[in-house]
Amino acid sequence: MALILEHIDIRVDDIAFLDDVSLTFKRGGLYTVLGRTLAGKTTLLRAIAGLQQPQKGTLTLNGKDYLHLPVWKRRVAMVYQQFINYPHLTVLANVAFPLRRAGVPAEEAKRRAMEVLDMVGLADFETRRPSALSGGQQQRVALARALVKRAEILLLDEPLVNLDYKLREQLREEFQNIFEGQDDAIVVYTTTEPAEAIQLGHELIIMDKGAVIQKGKPLAVFNAPATIRCAKIINDPPINIFDGAIENGAIQLQGSVLLPIPPHLAHLPQGTYCFGLRTSDLSLGGVIGSKVELSEISGSQTILHLSADIGAFILFEDGVSQHAIGSTVQVNLDSDRIYAFSPRGDLIAAPAITEN
Amino acid sequence: MKSLYLVLKYLAILLWSSFVALPFLWALTTSFKTSNGVTGGATYIPWLQYEPSLEGWKVLVRTGGQGINIVAPFISSAIVTLSASLISMVLGTLAAYGLSRFSYRLGFVKNSDITFFFIAQRIMPPIVLAIPFFLMLQFLGLLDTIPGLILVYVALLLPIATWVMVDFFNNVPPQIDEMALIDGCNPIGAFVRVILPNSLPGIMVGGLFCVMFGWNDFFFAFTLTFTKTQLLPVAVVALNSSVTPWWSLSASALVSVAPLVIIAFVVERFLSSGNMAGAIR
Amino acid sequence: MAKIELSDIAHTYEPDSDEPTYALKSLNLVWKDGGTYALLGPSGCGKTTMLNIVSGLIHPSQGKILFDGVDFTHFPTAKRNIAQVFQFPVIYTLMSVEENLAFPLVCRHMPQPERTRRVHEVAQLLNLTDKLKRPARKLAADEKQLISLGRGLVRNDVSALLLDEPLTVIDPQLKFEIRRKLKRINELYGLTMIYVTHDQNEAMTFADTIIVMSDGELIQSGTPQELYNRPETTYVGYFIGSPAMNFIECVPADDRLQTAGGSIPIPSNVSIPAGVGNLKIGIRPRNVKFAESKDAMAIKGQVNMVQEFGNCRVVTVRIQEEIIRMKLNPGTAIPSGEVSLDLPEDKVCIYANDVLIHQDR
Amino acid sequence: MLKLKYKQFFLLPGLIVLVAIIIFPLLFTIRVSFSSWDVVKPGLDWFGGKNWGRLFEDMRFWESLARLSLMATGSVFIQYLVGFGLALLVWRNIILKRFIRVLFLVPMMTTPVIMSVIWRTILHESLGPANDIIRILGFEPLSWLSTGPMAMVSVILVEVWQWTPFMFLLLLAGLMSLPNEPYMAAAIDGAGPFRTFFSVTFPLMAPISIGAILIRLIEASKLMETVYVLTSGGPGTATETSSYYIYIRGLRDYQIGYAASLSLAYLVIMIISLTIIAKILTRKIAQD
């Protein structure tokens, strides 16, 4: 079973919400779609569900044309950002609603609904109205309603974004266990948080301005982002980028800072490059002087916002240390962890994935 | 300063309340008067300033020569208003849901233009429609009949119903009906099973507006009926032009105004809550 | 500038019901002048109620609030020298940016020259100088939030700045910019800052003292490090840090603590009071390591899940009914089969009935 | 595609009914306005633009239009001031809140023409309580319905009594939907009641105020029933409004053709002036 999108275009008064998107989703696959707001993630889900008609392109499920099938004839389930439930129905009636519409007898619908409610931990809330529940519980009801149908395609549009920080963490764990059980459905989950996308997804899709700019195994994409844009989206805080060049045997950054060429960049011809370095791949006590713009301590880590001739960058330091704003700090760039991008932003060389 | 503000505040409220109550109280006392209570100048308190009598009220139900028989017009008014309101609310709610959820395009005419067309009927002064309706009903042979009036009142109330319901549906998040579609309802199913059960507040406000504008209309009833059918407002105004004594005039006025005033007390909760603001934006 | 004291403050929104639920249970708190404080907790834990009591928008059902020892409990908001920034940017829609900033001074009848000087000074600090003449409502959300911040700074009588989840509607990339300005302001003006949030990263990065609340109760107040390394209760250990602190049941066995999968030595400077029930070992996922040597007594378990987060790897180890999570650097090798864990003594916290047993100094 | 079928199901019934009842008769009226249909020669003939020519010289029509706009804007303005004032008073911390709100609501529910009948007895110069109260207060009794300007004041008085509650209700609902934070911010900035009103309440209420004013202007432009009962256009034509004048020409003198052209002219003028006013007011909100 496979859901195939080919050259899907959706434009609304000349803003490209989906720009020539081609994707293949396989049964049992858990796909996470990562991208900033307005990257086209929600439009992608709405196109699959049939809520939005693409101007161009084909959409087929197991070869059957899905494009012209109306929403209510597609075996699709969806969870919205804003925990959408039917206000006038009890929690149990909410979850049984799709089964009743599919002609399942009342008794069996009630049983299956109770089963799924138990799975999401709302077993003893079935007589309540959704409005009487907390945000997290309302979202669980919406999830239960999506799961009870055992639909071929399960779509989740940033389901945790409106919840408290700690609740998000907890529900993410629950989602992971629940999705493991959906091995005969296609699950598509959109998010703006890289950690969530990498943790939940078997396959990761990065979208920006309506286009799919990279897809692949989450760790592979993390370790080898195709472009600077992908690298910025996949890292939080974003990857540091330094303009520079490779000349006479060394990496030259602005402010005549020289770095030794690491083995994985040795084969690169001389020329100008954009060098990328993750915030956790810089450390204190190096040779490059820089000014502290801001230092933020978060429990076990210190986040230093620094500026120097080579440009402004962020450094993640394990452990906690105080730095007054404006003081200077010596920084070391770990050249073995440097990414090399072409001036246009395409990845040329990535550091080896270390198995220490 | 605080206490002065409070005194002024309650004084203003008292002043306006008495201004509001004046016509009702005056009509009430007058309805129990007899001629000497009226001709000698304004009198207010029964037994002290005048001898009250039930004459004003009795004449209302007496049929034949001397009586005014307010009952028949009361019933016709009720029939016309309720049926026109029902038809307008049904058609209006459907049209409003369509306008709020779908995008219609007839040539260059878009949704907002169609909604404006509905609302623009309210801009149409009644007199402009009086002549065409007169000629239309004459042509259809419905002049001076209840069905004729119902037809005209639907034209009067449908724009109101649609206006209130469009604004109500625009405040219901579209994701709810989308969720119903995804769960297997076709658009009509989504409307009936999910939207309607949640639209009670909007329907209440819309229905109330229709009944209010229908029951209180004088002009169309006046121009399009003669002898056979007579609605309440027309009947009362007819008394006014003839030399009817003030007491039966006041009594008949109070009777025809009473139903909606009672409804006002019952439904105040809906009117002053958010729906009204919604109904206007 | 003022020291703010909340003495025996409690509040309920149903004063006349016979057993009212308390949004804020009785608590005492002192905020030093010039400090930055974060009120951290899930929604509905009473943090906004507390903020509104300080700002005077709510009069507490009981207790007193003192600014530098003066009882302000029944003072109206205007008389309290506080400023507040709300979750959604609040600006006066008809006014320009300059008029917005000057509004509090106009209300206080400050002479014009002084007023303009202060407005330009604050505009310069918040780099709004080139936007002063523009209508305030045409600005982006983050600039509007700076305006409402500026309205507090122009006044010369503000001793405390209250911030109610101010960054919720701001784009992630711009949050850093506003946090930087807030820190600069704190250093420049020495303003006490009280910041309400449910996001622990924001609380940890912003405040030098964090007050963790739950169900209207003050659970712990301390520096980010204290909360991270020495959480007062298991709730704080769970709430602060991602993923949450591990907790394993244990029983004292002479000088060691016996758990379901092995035991660890009792930390030297911790004495377990006799007969105390429900003992737990608490340790941060980042501090759990795989044991090098095969120490027979070490805690052993089965690896049952490995989660990848890109910049770190979280391993879940099952020990009978309980689990321990380990936060490791990406690509760290994971031994197969049964693993034994090393819990460094200085990183372990012992809890009796969910409350930390303090180390004897 | 498929959704089309459902789309039509919703809108078409209502649209067809409205178009049938309104548009056909309207088109017929346009045809009639080019005929000399009147009591002498009923029936459709072709009269060319004579009706329209006569209309432009008919000063009585243009005066009635001027009177209408005077009375309409006057009454709507007073309704707005009183309605907004009352809404502000009743908005917060008020005792008997529910009772007062209902009492303020009642006039709107009553039948305008029937209340005019009652007002006619109230404003009766010798027997009515209006002059009686004035005499008690020691002032000269007023000739409510017998002199031109006072007749207009009486019509406005009745309109204000009848429709201020509508304005009050809209504005109160608007006030209650306002967010709380701007008021908290104003309190913190130290703004007094008046400054808070002009810098927070009024700007936030602008859209709703304009909506309410527009609705009332539309209703007030149809002023006819109150005039018919209270003053029947009198004294003389002192309170004659356009609708009333067209009513006389059309349904009393039975000059159907001329009345048709009058009513179409009146409709066009109303649509143009109301859309202009709407544009000015909405542009004012957008701009400020």
Image (cartoon, coloured by chain):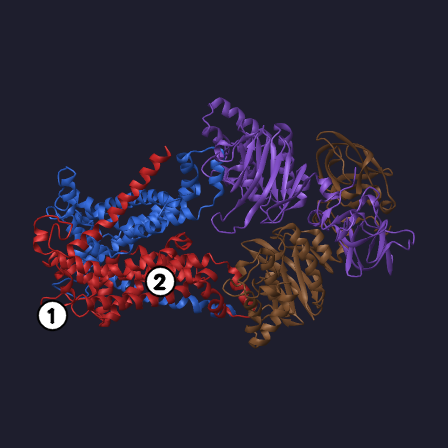
Chain colours: A brown, B red, C purple, D blue
Task: Report the residue marked by disc 1.
Answer: B64
Q: Which residue is painted at 59% across and 54% down in the image?
A: A16
Q: Taking C51 as reference, is D177 above or below it? A: below
Q: Taking D159 as reference, is C32 above or below it? A: above
Q: Is residue B196 left or right of residue D226?
A: right
Task: Report the residue marked by disc 2.
Answer: B207
Binning the other alpha carbons within 10 Å of mark 2 as few (below 14), some (14 to 19) or many (20 upward) gives many
Binning the other alpha carbons within 10 Å of mark 1 as few (below 14), some (14 to 19) or many (20 upward) gives few
Task: Please report, as a chain letter, where disc 1 is located.
Answer: B
Measured as percent of width and height from the top left, residue A123 is found at 62, 65
- Camera-side residue of A96 and B90: A96
Q: Earlier in the sequence, mark 2 or mark 1?
A: 1
Element class at badge 2: helix
Q: Amino acid at mark 1?
A: Gly
Q: Which residue is painted at 60% across and 65% down in the image?
A: A124
- Camera-side residue of A19 and C153: C153
Task: Please report, as a chain letter, where disc 2 is located.
Answer: B
